Amino acid sequence: MSLQQLEQAWSAGRLVPLAGPGETVPVVPASLEHQYGPGVIVGSGGSMGGRRWCVLPLAHLQQSALATGRWLAAQGLDPASCLHLNPLPLHHVSGLLPWVRSRQWGAQHRTLAPALMRDPLALAETLPLAELACQGPVLLSLVPTQLGRLLADPVGVAWLQQVALIWVGGAPMSPDLAAMARQLRLPLAPCYGATETAAMVCALTPRRFLAGEQGCGAPLDGVRLRVESGSGALAIATARLSPGWLVQGALVPLPRTVDGWWLSGDAARFSDQGLQVLGRLDAAIHSGGETVFPEQVEQRLAALIEAAALPVAAVLLVGESDALWGERLVALVRLRAECSSEPVLAALNQLAQQLPPAQRPVRWQECASLETTLAGKWQRQRWQQWLVDQLAG
């Protein structure tokens, strides 16, 4: 769907589903549109499980944009005079919000083709920021993988140095990447948010980032954050929380604590420097700005393996740190007896090319002892440690 089509749908009071490539668009009941008015339904990783369709009324998106605009003004930037460059897909809340912000602020917005973010020279030629910056401050939203690719090329570095402010979110930024950005004096603003919160709920100012502070800063206007005792889960309270998820044509309300807080599924702590997100509480990994659930990828791989009739007895996916992507999946594989591993692993790698990039295992590791418990469950921590021991050996 184009931005013009989305604008027209909202004018008609529609609640529009935004699906990614290969995703089935959910059916939106008329009662939901009548109750919440215009808005979107976008895919979310959920707090502690698989992919869900999150309902976001337009009013919640606008509240998010207004809060971000006030934060921007506090940094000395007039939101209405900015050009917001957007290299993220519309079906992600982080790709939708730059346009909503620009629409709300009366600012300029420009979509960047994903291919440009992998080709710094083409990006610099297509968008000469020395010329654009004369028209007003340039804003940019990136995930760490995109930032890393641009920083790996001198042309990309020179281009980034002309941006007034760079929000970085979607996944944790590695210390090495942050150190490089500080050395280059890039005005980064590490931030944190979720689909269910209509994107960003806190951000570290570029001034504090360049001074060496860590984390995601302080909450934006209209947002309260706390860490639950015991679980360490980050809890969020804001008027722009999603009303819930669309499941088989019905709204499943967003679960909240008795006093109205939503548990994000991320572990966190607070320091003098603000919010410090420690990682997911469930089995999910952050890979290239995507939240990836190994169980779901394993199911897709199992179907592909069965269709290809490969001699594979078991596959388990575990996460591994990666300097560029944040984390990547590694596949542990137990093959059937009396088969040569090299051609099978090569065939598995070829099959995985059908998956989205963040879901493709970066490596395939044969593991003859790989097995579930007697109850048929995976002891993921056990096999994660097995992988660590293999690398150490």
Image: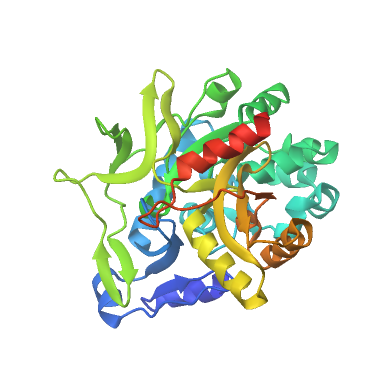
Q: How is the image coloured?
A: rainbow
Position of residue 25 measured from the top left corner of the image (x, y, whole percent): 47, 77
Position of residue 351 measured from the top left corner of the image (x, y, whole percent): 69, 67
Position of residue 296 measured from the top left corner of the image (x, y, whole percent): 49, 61
Q: Quarter of the image containing the N terminus?
A: bottom right
Q: Is residue 114 above or below residue 3?
A: above
Q: Nearer the viewer, residue 155 or 281?
A: 281
Is 369 placed left or right of 254 in the picture?
right
Is 31 placed left or right of 13 in the picture?
left
Q: Nearer the viewer, residue 241 or 227?
A: 227
Residue at point 60% right, 32% down? Answer: 389
Residue at point 62% right, 41% down? Answer: 144
Residue at point 62% right, 52% down? Answer: 331
Q: Nearer the viewer, residue 111 or 273?
A: 273
Residue 78 appears in the picture as rendered: no
Residue 204 appears in the picture as rendered: yes
Residue at point 67% right, 36% down? Answer: 323
Q: Is residue 331 above or below residue 139?
A: below
Q: Nearer the viewer, residue 146 or 45?
A: 45
Question: Residue 114 falls in which quadrant of the image?
Answer: bottom right
Residue sticking out furthest to the left: 258
Question: Residue 195 falls in which quadrant of the image?
Answer: bottom left
